[in-house]
Image: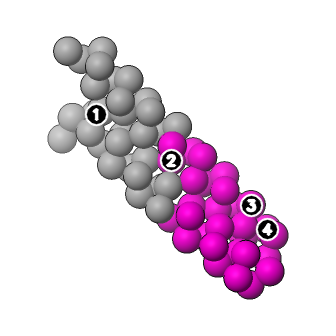
């Protein structure tokens, strides 16, 4: 698997995982969990963008 594709896939995974944590934090009234989810979601978006950038630079 190419590095760019791997970054995009992992980024998507972290975005989804972060979103689930964020929702769980809101539902359980746990601001710490909600914050962790938001952070992980943002990190996933960044990793996905890095994968997109690598894909463009490989061509």
Tell me whether circle 4 and circle 3 mark residues in contact (CB < 8 Å): yes
Span highlighted in magenta in the image = 17-45
- For disc 1, the marked residue is 3
Q: Residue at x 44, y 33 (%)?
A: 49
Residue 35, which numbered label? Answer: 3
Q: Residue at x 35, y 42 (%)?
A: 8
The quarter of the picture where the N terminus appears is top left
Majority SS type along the magenta span: helix
The quarter of the picture where the C terminus appears is top left
Counting residues from the start of the chain, the first of labels 3 and 2 encountered is: 3
Is residue 9 part of the magenta span, yes or no? Answer: no
- For disc 4, the marked residue is 32
Q: Few, some or many C-alpha atoms within 10 Å of disc 3 (few <14, some 14-19, many ≥20)?
A: some
* Separation of marks 1 and 4 at Cα, in angstroms: 32 Å
Counting residues from the start of the chain, the first of labels 2 and 4 encountered is: 4
* Separation of marks 3 and 1 at Cα, in angstroms: 29 Å
């Amino acid at each position: 698997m190419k590095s760019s594709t791997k970054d995009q896939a992992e980024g998507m995974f972290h975005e989804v995982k972060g979103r689930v944590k964020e929702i769980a934090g809101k539902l359980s009234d746990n601001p710490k969990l909600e914050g962790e989810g938001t952070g992980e979601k943002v990190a996933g978006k960044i990793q996905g963008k890095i994968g997109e950038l690598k894909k463009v630079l490989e061509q």
